Image: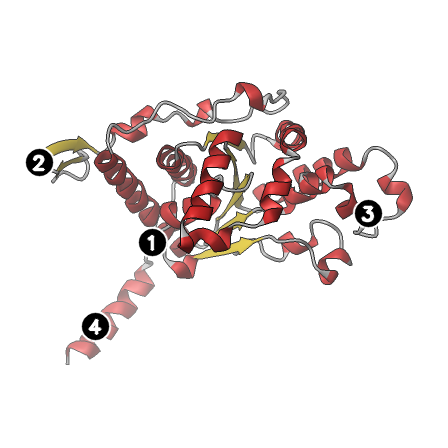
């Protein structure tokens, strides 16, 4: 087995571990700041970066191993934090994405939050209040399964949600509520970046037909029945409205410091390799390292060692 050569004997053959990474160019999926977004022209199925299920598993394991190493240094250095945001239509694979890609991360250094319909306490505050309470501490990775972006997506598709937030009528009816919210989000993310939080945002781009197939599987598999409800079918009626809301959101809030990536999600395995590569690249750009031990600390450790040796 080679680690740095990235060659591993597998199932009687040789799989080149770095192959999947070389095939993935994160810039292919990044939303350019200030550019219009047309999701109908963005593929939901991309050419696989793996040739077999075995190669996929090996490549993902390699990514996870590298991520684990980077996360350990992130935690030890205790300076930066990383926030991953996942948004998608139902059944796009957010849960399984988090489960598989982050499977090698030390739980002590990772915080996962799922955002549901706002309760009474959330409705009594501004739309960013709940999310800011859950931001990752220095040295940690925070994962938002859905996020404050719901406030410019589902709230835009379902205006009754916005009305329930008890915002002054004049502000809601001004016609600029979405522009104002985009502005608030961009400013928040800029502030976080300037204080050491790196933000990566993923839109898992699923086709309506693939969603239909996955819903059927949830119905047919008893262990997945709990993941399906009639409300999921009702939301399919608003597919086009959601796509327009996502297009406006992605175009307005993808910035240099907090980019959006539109990841083709019809192939879950491919999507996991793309996401893990983007996360890994972002961490590597931080040039993380374990804190250096001072001479004073070396002397202290030698003293402790001598005591333990006795």
Give the Cα distance between marks 2 and 1: 43 Å
Q: Secondary structure at mark 2?
A: loop
| Sequence-earlier tag: 2 or 3 | 2
- Whichever of callouts 1 and 4 sits on the residue coming sooner in the sequence is 1
Q: What residue is drawn where x is 28% and y is 29%?
A: 50
- Quote the CA–CA distance across marks 2 and 3: 61 Å
What residue is rendered at 82% in x and 33% in y? 176
| Residue at mark 4 | 305
Mark 2: few, some, or many residues within 10 Å (few <14, many ≥20)? few
- Which of the 4 image quadrants contains residue 267? top left
Question: Is the residue marked by circle 3 packed among few (<14), some (14-19), or many (20+) residues within 10 Å?
Answer: few
Residue 8 falls left or right of residue 71? left
Residue at 46% x, 47% y: name it: 219
Q: Is residue 305 above or below residue 69?
A: below
Q: Nearer the viewer, mark 3 or mark 1?
A: 3
Q: Nearer the viewer, mark 3 or mark 4?
A: 3
When the figure is inspected, residue 45 is found, relative to residue 284, above or below; the finding is above
* Residue under label 3: 163
**For the residue labelled by badge 3, is the local secondary structure a helix, a strand or a loop?**
helix
Which of disc 4 and disc 3 is earlier in sequence?
A: 3
Closer-to-camera residue (237/46): 237
Residue ID for mark 2: 12
Disc number placed over residue 133 in the picture, else none = none
Q: Residue 86, how many percent across, how many down?
A: 52, 42
Residue designated by label 1: 292
């Amino acid at each position: 087995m080679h680690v740095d050569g990235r060659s591993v004997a597998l199932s009687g053959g040789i799989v080149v571990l770095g192959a999947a990474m070389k095939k993935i160019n994160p810039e292919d999926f990044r939303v350019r700041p200030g550019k219009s977004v047309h999701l109908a022209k963005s593929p939901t199925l991309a050419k696989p970066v793996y040739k077999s299920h075995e190669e996929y598993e090996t490549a993902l394991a390699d990514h996870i191993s590298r991520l684990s190493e980077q996360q350990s240094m992130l935690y030890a250095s205790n300076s930066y934090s990383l926030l991953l945001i996942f948004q998608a239509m139902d059944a796009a694979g957010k849960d399984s994405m988090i489960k598989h890609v982050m499977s090698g991360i030390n739980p002590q250094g990772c915080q996962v939050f799922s955002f549901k319909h706002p309760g009474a306490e959330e409705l009594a505050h501004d739309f960013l209040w709940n999310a800011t309470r859950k931001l990752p501490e220095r040295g940690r990775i925070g994962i938002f399964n859905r996020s404050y972006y719901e406030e410019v997506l589902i709230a835009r598709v379902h205006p009754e949600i916005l009305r329930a937030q008890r915002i002054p009528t004049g502000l809601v009816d001004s016609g600029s509520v979405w522009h104002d919210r985009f502005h608030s989000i961009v400013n928040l993310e800029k502030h976080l970046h300037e204080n050491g939080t790196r933000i990566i945002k993923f839109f898992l781009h699923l086709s309506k037909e693939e969603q239909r197939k996955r819903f059927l599987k949830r119905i047919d598999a008893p262990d997945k029945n709990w993941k399906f409800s009639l409300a999921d079918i009702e939301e399919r009626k608003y597919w086009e409205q959601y796509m327009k809301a996502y297009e406006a959101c992605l175009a307005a809030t993808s910035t240099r410091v907090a980019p959006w990536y539109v990841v083709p999600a019809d192939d879950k395995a491919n999507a996991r390799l793309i996401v893990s590569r983007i996360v890994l690249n972002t961490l590597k750009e931080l040039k993380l390292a374990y804190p250096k031990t001072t001479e004073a600390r070396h002397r202290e450790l030698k003293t402790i060692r001598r005591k333990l040796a006795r």
